[in-house]
Image (cartoon, rainbow, N blue to C red):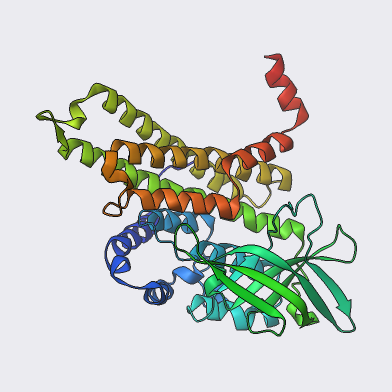
Amino acid sequence: MSLQNSTEQQMLHDSASRWVTGDAKQADRAARWRQMADFGWLGITLPEAYGGLGQGLAEACVLAEALGTGPVTDPWLPVVIQAAGLLAACGTAAQCEPWLGSVARGESVIVPAVLERGRDWRTRALATRAVQTGPGWTLSGRKELVAGGAWADAFVVGATIGNPQDYGLFVVARSAPGVTVTPLESVDGSGACRLVLEDVRLSESDRLAGADAASFERACDDALVVACAESVGAMDTLLRATADYLKTRVQFGKPLAVNQALRHRMADLSIACEEARSMTLSAVQALSDPSLEPATRIRKAAGVRAKVGALARRVCEEAIQLHGGMGVTEELAVGVFLKRQVALDAMFGPPEWHLRRHAALRPVGAALKEISQ
């Protein structure tokens, strides 16, 4: 396994990092989104036939790591990796044509709306239901929190169809009759919404016929690893910023960096960053293998998010503490990184939840072997 970026990947990382520290800080949300489209980042993993770049998970993670150094909180991850990724994988050409090209050009924002409060769509039927009515469908239900939904033009909605075990995905336009979108503030400022569907009538062409629970699981797995890459970028930035602060902050006539206890804590944070990077690279390699079994894929994604999510929270909290009183002020960006990690946990589940998922999916033989040792 190569632990180094290719020349093209390094160029992508460097150009994105320069943009994050330069133009991105001066632009508003709409301007940033247009610039990301001009760079081709909104279509980085989309097929070339729809205006995308046709790149893979590794390139998406390279870009996410650079965006994490900002952090850039625009809904790039749910739009490109989840919603557009689902359309590209499961939609027909007639369904992909009007949406994917528009997403890649930055003209439309489409986000996934699957999660429901108190329900795990993997084990329980969703409360949102789709009933077949003649040649079309009628959708009813609500999604309490849709990440990036405040800016969305359309939603990929998950619903139960027929039997509780049956699962369907539908593309629902924001402007469709019966759709109510209530914007919600999010802790990182990325914007979310509450989505209410009241007898929304859709045609058969609005259903992603090739999508099911397994396809959405695959998109979620990719998103988890990309989120880990973003966390790695944030952790590296915080590590450098904290080291610089300890070198320049003087107390009792000496820089804080000469304090041995603080040096030990910084060493621990450096190790945490390397652990997170190594696990993310390992997950990228594993999930890029098309022959990987679904259960193994899910377990790998859950394991890496459980570990990296916990490490990212720890690094953020330690960075704030090592900055002292300045760490909790708006003057420094340290607190923004913690808010972003909290938002990622809300979007994809906290580390503890993924740890339980990983344990539940572990082969019984492997678990018994560990116990016997």
Q: Residue at x 78, y 82 (%)?
A: 201
Position of residue 125 in the picture relative to residue 259 (left or right): right
Q: Vertically, is 304 above or below 28?
A: above
Relative to 175, say whether 127 is above or below.
above
The residue drawn where x is 50% and y is 71% is 43
Q: Is residue 11 shown to the viewer in this render? A: yes
**How far from the left and from the top, in percent, is residue 169?**
74, 68
Give residue 232's position: percent from left, percent from top.
43, 46
Q: Quadrant of residue 321?
A: top left
Question: Which of the 4 image quarters holds residue 40?
Answer: bottom left
Q: Is residue 255 above or below residue 52?
A: above
Residue 83, percent from left and from top: 61, 67
- Left of 286 or right of it: where is 104? left
The C terminus lies in quadrant: top right
Q: Is residue 288 visible?
A: no
Q: Which sits in the foreground, 60 or 48?
A: 60
* Residue 218 position (above or below residue 352): below
Outermost residue on the top side: it is 373
Residue positioned 60% across, 48% down in the render: 349
Q: Nearer the viewer, residue 306 or 368?
A: 306
- Could you say which is closer to the camera, residue 349 or residue 11? 349
Identify which residue is drawn at 45% across, 58% down.
188
